[in-house]
Image: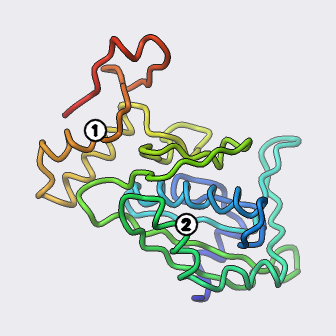
């Protein structure tokens, strides 16, 4: 495990959620059913972060509280929870088989002063993709918690609108941003490759970039580029 950077410490203490910063409550990285939900939630967010230019960071140890407005409880992790993340290979072995390509993640950890008390936090740093095609889910996971649900063949992205969430890509702005970035950082990405990506997603969208459902799907052709 690598030490937290000063930027990470500052964000843990004072930051808010953004497209490249996601907060998750403290939990133990284990094999129990409760841990499974959180682990799939982390994997899903990693997919979305990897599809974002510059990647992103997932902070473990901050719980979002909505009572009285949007606020955060920066509780940190117990020592047992903290130590459960001290195994990058185990975390990578869980995440990587669930995507169409290998993700590059780095585990950071350390103490941060919160309200005159040192508390433990984990940051999973997700680097952006280096391949000329996006990260696509290759697994399916059902959960009562919608933030943990994963759909096979889905392309997850960090929304450009508020509230910022990890969702299947759906708006025209999001498609434009992703595809322009893929083309700019990898010139060998051809039009045929783009069409292949969109066909593999099996995501029907209108000319305005909106997803359709139910009977409308049959009358809508899949968007190509």
Assign a secondary structure to mark 2: strand
Per the model, the C-alpha gap separating discs 2 and 1 is 27 Å
In the rendering, at what x and y percent does residue 158 appear?
A: 50, 47
Which mark identifies residue 198?
A: 1
In the rendering, at what x and y percent does residue 80 appear?
A: 82, 82
Residue 79 appears left or right of 90: right
53 or 107: nearer the viewer: 107
Q: Residue furthest bottom?
A: 2
In the rendering, at what x and y percent does residue 223 appear?
A: 27, 28
31 or 1: nearer the viewer: 31
Name which residue lies at 65% across and 73% down: 10
Residue 73 appears left or right of 132: right
User: For mark 2, does the 10 Å Cα neighbourhood hold few (<14), some (14 to 19), or many (20 or more) residues?
Assistant: many
Q: Measured along the vertical axis of the image, is residue 129 above or below residue 217? A: below
The image quadrant that residue 212 belongs to is top left
34 or 77: nearer the viewer: 34
How many numbered badges does the structure rendering display?
Answer: 2
- Which mark is in front, 2 or 1? 1
Name which residue lies at 84% across and 79% down: 78
Name which residue lies at 82% across and 49% down: 65
Residue 220 appears left or right of 88: left
Q: Earlier in the sequence, mark 2 or mark 1?
A: 2
Which mark identifies residue 57?
A: 2
Q: Measured along the vertical axis of the image, is residue 143 above or below residue 35? A: above
The image quadrant that residue 30 belongs to is bottom right
In the rendering, at what x and y percent does residue 50 appear?
A: 42, 60
How is colour applied across the structure in the image? rainbow
User: For mark 1, does the 10 Å Cα neighbourhood hold few (<14), some (14 to 19), or many (20 or more) residues?
Assistant: some
Q: Quadrant of the C terminus?
A: top left
Q: Quadrant of the N terminus?
A: bottom right
Assign a secondary structure to mark 1: helix
Name which residue lies at 82% across and 74% down: 114
């Amino acid at each position: 495990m690598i030490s937290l950077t000063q930027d990470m410490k500052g964000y843990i203490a004072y930051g808010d959620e953004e497209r490249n910063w996601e907060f998750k409550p403290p939990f133990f990285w284990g094999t129990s059913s409760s841990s499974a939900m959180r682990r799939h939630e982390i994997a899903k967010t990693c997919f979305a972060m990897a599809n974002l230019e510059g990647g992103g960071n997932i902070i473990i140890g901050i719980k979002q509280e909505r009572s009285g407005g949007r606020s955060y409880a920066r509780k940190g992790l117990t020592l047992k929870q903290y130590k459960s993340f001290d195994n990058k290979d185990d975390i990578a072995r869980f995440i990587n088989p669930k995507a169409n390509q290998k993700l590059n993640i780095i585990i950071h950890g350390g103490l941060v002063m919160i309200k005159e008390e040192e508390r433990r936090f984990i940051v999973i740093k997700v680097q952006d993709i280096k391949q000329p095609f996006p990260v696509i889910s290759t697994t399916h996971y059902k959960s009562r918690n919608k933030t943990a649900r994963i759909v096979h063949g889905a392309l997850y992205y960090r929304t450009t609108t508020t509230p910022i969430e990890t969702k299947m890509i759906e708006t025209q702005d999001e498609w434009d941003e992703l595809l322009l970035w893929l083309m700019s950082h990898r010139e060998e990405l051809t039009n045929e490759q783009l069409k292949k990506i969109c066909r593999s997603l099996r995501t029907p969208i209108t000319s305005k970039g909106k997803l359709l459902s139910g009977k409308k799907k049959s009358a809508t052709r899949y968007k190509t580029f």
